Image (cartoon, rainbow, N blue to C red):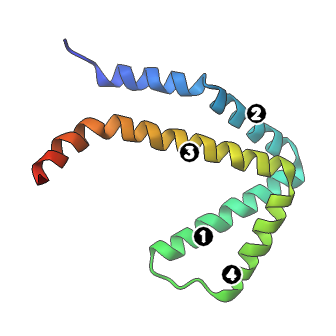
Amino acid sequence: MTVNLHDSAHELENAIRNSDEYTTLRKLYDEVNADASAKEMFEKFRNMQIELQQKQMSGQEIEQGEVAQAQILVADVQKNEKISKLMEAEQRMSTIVTELNQIVLKPLEELYGSMGQ
């Protein structure tokens, strides 16, 4: 039996789009974007995350002042109910994607994992 992996991947994409987790995430994302102050705070938070991750990945030291600013921003973000709910939904979706990735890669892990034994 020949399996078209791209067709299967598109089926998985549709399953994700129609999942409760994704529709909840989309709804919460739209709610944050509809609220100007929440949107601005969320974008500032995401930009700060990206900037600090890039610094870390390039081996640059993160300064104490940047850490303090990040902590303040995280505290503010956590106080915003819309953003907090969105971040919880993002975490659930991230967990699902990690689990799906493990399932998809299982045949390769079994194949190459057996070589070391």
Where residue 93 sits: x, y (%)?
59, 40
First in sequence, mark 2 or 1: give its number: 2
Residue underneath mark 2:
27
Where residue 21 sits: x, y (%)?
64, 32
In this view, 92 is above or below 70 = above
Residue 51's label in the rendered image is 1
Q: Secondary structure at mark 1?
A: helix
Between disc 3 and disc 4, the foreground one is 3
At 30% from the left edge and 24% from the top edge, which residue is drawn?
5
Q: CA distance from mark 2 to mark 3?
A: 16 Å
In the image, 94: left or right of 72?
left
The amino acid type found where label 4 is placed reads Glu
Q: CA distance from mark 1 to mark 3?
A: 20 Å
At 63% from the left edge and 32% from the top edge, which residue is drawn?
22
In this view, 106 is above or below 6 = below
At 34% from the left edge and 24% from the top edge, which residue is drawn?
6
Residue underneath mark 4:
66
Residue 72's label in the rendered image is none
Q: Crowdedness of circle 3 by 10 Å Cα count: few (<14), some, many (20+)? A: few
Q: Secondary structure at mark 3?
A: helix
Q: CA distance from mark 2 to mark 1?
A: 27 Å
First in sequence, mark 3 or 4: give its number: 4
Toward the viewer: 104 or 14? Answer: 104
Between disc 1 and disc 3, the foreground one is 3
In the image, 27: left or right of 36?
left
